[in-house]
Image (spheres, rainbow, N blue to C red):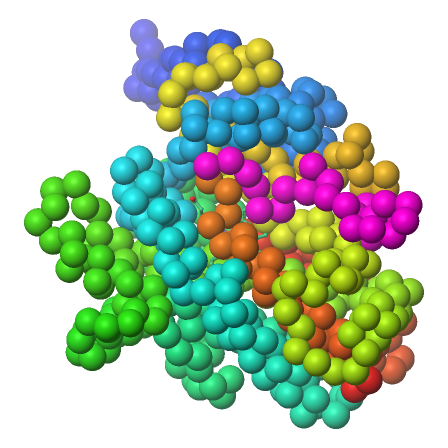
Amino acid sequence: MWNLTELLLLLLLCFFIIKYLKIIWVARGLPPGPIPLPFIGNLWTLSFKLHPETFKHLSILYGNIYTVWLGETPLVVLNGCKSVKDGIVSHSEELSGRPVTSFLKDLLGGKGVVSSNGHIWKQQRRFGLMTLKNLGLGKCKLESRIQEEAQCLVESITARNGESLDPSAIITHSVANVISAVVFGHRFSIDDGIFQNLVRCNHGLVESMGSTWGRIYDSFPWLMKHVPGPHQKAFSLIDYLHQFIINEIRIHKENGLAEEPEDVIDYYLAQISNTTGNANSTFDEENLITLVTDLFAAGTETTATSLQWALLYMVAYPHVQRKVHKELDAVLGGPQLISYEDRKRLPYTNAVIHEIQRFGNIVAVGLARTCIKDVTISGYSLQKNTMVLPNLDSVLHDAQYWHTPNQFNPQHFLDNDGNFCVNEAFLPFSAGHRVCLGEQLARYELFIFFTTLMQSFKFQLPQGVTEVNTKYVFSLTLQPHPYKICAFPR
Ligand code: HEM
């Protein structure tokens, strides 16, 4: 006769076998990939992270389209420019869904833009794009905001008198101030403690969203919800951000509806009022709070991290810095306000900024999508709701499109005559229906901040420091290791 322990073990074994067979059943028809285990799938192989190096290794083993399992959910990974474009450009509509993982759902509630779907996503995204345009993107208004902020950054750096400084905090504050002007209608003093907390919270939130704990939460939400750990920090950080935004909304409401809306909150409150009673409308305060959180979070970390890479690469590749200085001096002469239009006269500098984005590759493997309908990609039929990852890292390093994919080389964006040229594998903002909503704003910011800094300073390593660490720290964005530099006025 079986004793109780043996019976339990047998039951457990049967349970595992059933789970395993279920995975094998679902995996039929999906692209190949490493063998998944019940419950954890391939999380062990992935070290619980969506790491570019692991994906690169898997594409050598399984080709340009393969499947990995995040717990019990399959994720189809597209690799290389051709395969990624076949997915998100040729089947843009079909791949326009966003997987709302348990962690994201509990944090953001499926509202706003980044993690919403369907009708909410369409309305909120359209509104976001239109409002950025109304606020002057592409016209002088927003551009002069960026120019002012860039000047403030120059002043903060000048005040350090060439002493060594870690530029991350001041850069992040400047970029956060641009997006604050867009969403809240005002900037903050760099010494404002509340604003410093807000920026710190935002950074912490982005970090925890990319952490191993987020992946574990997605696999065992029922358990992790109640277990203490670093993932719980994300909930208190999002609460802080939301409280800040709720307070800004309250102040806007107290001031009454603006005759001439000046920021996202103004436009949104007017929209709520115009659509009250319309059953089709998704404009409400919860979506407003999440939209502002999305814009602030997505708009600060990304651009600030890119600029931090920019300065690091300038000290790592001083010959490139010298050529940028030479071009700026030759074309612009003395100090002057730089506008986005000037990029056409500054092909080398423009190429350097593009190469900073390609080589820095801050969004790593990119954000996952879901199929909102059945679709065939690279010969595989993927069913509705299948999760797909267009691996942006593999596009920005695709050897078929870049001469020297693993080197920092501005020539990637220049023709033989030194003219700027676009490369079709330049997809740091992704592509298709879900392409980055802030792409235009980010391009303006990167160009104006970078050229203003380069026009004002020569950047060098502090005395005694001879090596530059250009390796990244893995988080939701790929960040440089903390570093110090000296800025000497030119
Ligand atoms: C260098 C700067 C930036 C980079 C590299 C970047 C990159 C990206 C990428 C790769 C995505 C994912 C698209 C996809 O699903 O495939 C994304 C989405 C998004 N970005 Fe950016 N971004 C940057 C700046 C900004 C800024 C300044 C804003 C805000 C004003 C912003 C707002 C958003 C939003 C709201 C989404 C979600 C779009 C959607 O799901 O429909 N981003 N970004």
Q: Residue furthest left?
A: 277
Residue 162 can be seen in this image: yes
Residue at 81% from the left image edge and 70% from the top image edge: 331
Q: Find residue 197 and report its horizontal and vertical position in percent.
A: 43, 76
- Answer with left or right where residue 169 lies relative to residue 117: right
Residue range in magenta is: 406-433
Q: Find residue 396 and report its horizontal and vertical position in percent.
A: 70, 41
Residue at 17% from the left image edge and 75% from the top image edge: 256
In the rendered image, which quarter contains the C terminus? Answer: bottom right
Q: Find residue 318 and report its horizontal and vertical position in percent.
A: 88, 67
Please, what is the dominant secondary structure of the magenta stretch?
Answer: loop
Above or below, comparing residue 65 to residue 98 in the picture: above
Residue at 37% from the left image edge and 39% from the top image edge: 100
- Answer with left or right where residue 286 lies relative to residue 348: left
Q: Which of the 4 quarters of the picture holds residue 231?
A: bottom left
Q: Nearer the viewer, residue 398 or 426?
A: 426
Taking the magenta stretch, the answer to whether it contains residue 413 is yes
In the rendered image, which quarter contains the N terminus? Answer: top left
Q: Find residue 242 and report its horizontal and vertical position in percent.
A: 30, 65
Q: Residue furthest top?
A: 1
* Total labels drawn: 0
Above or below, comparing residue 301 to residue 419 in the picture: below
Taking the magenta stretch, the answer to whether it contains residue 402 is no
Above or below, comparing residue 369 to residue 253 in the picture: above
Residue at 48% from the left image edge and 29% from the top image edge: 92
Residue 199 can be seen in this image: no
- Answer with left or right where residue 144 lies relative to residue 231: right
Q: Which of the 4 quarters of the picture holds residue 387?
A: top left
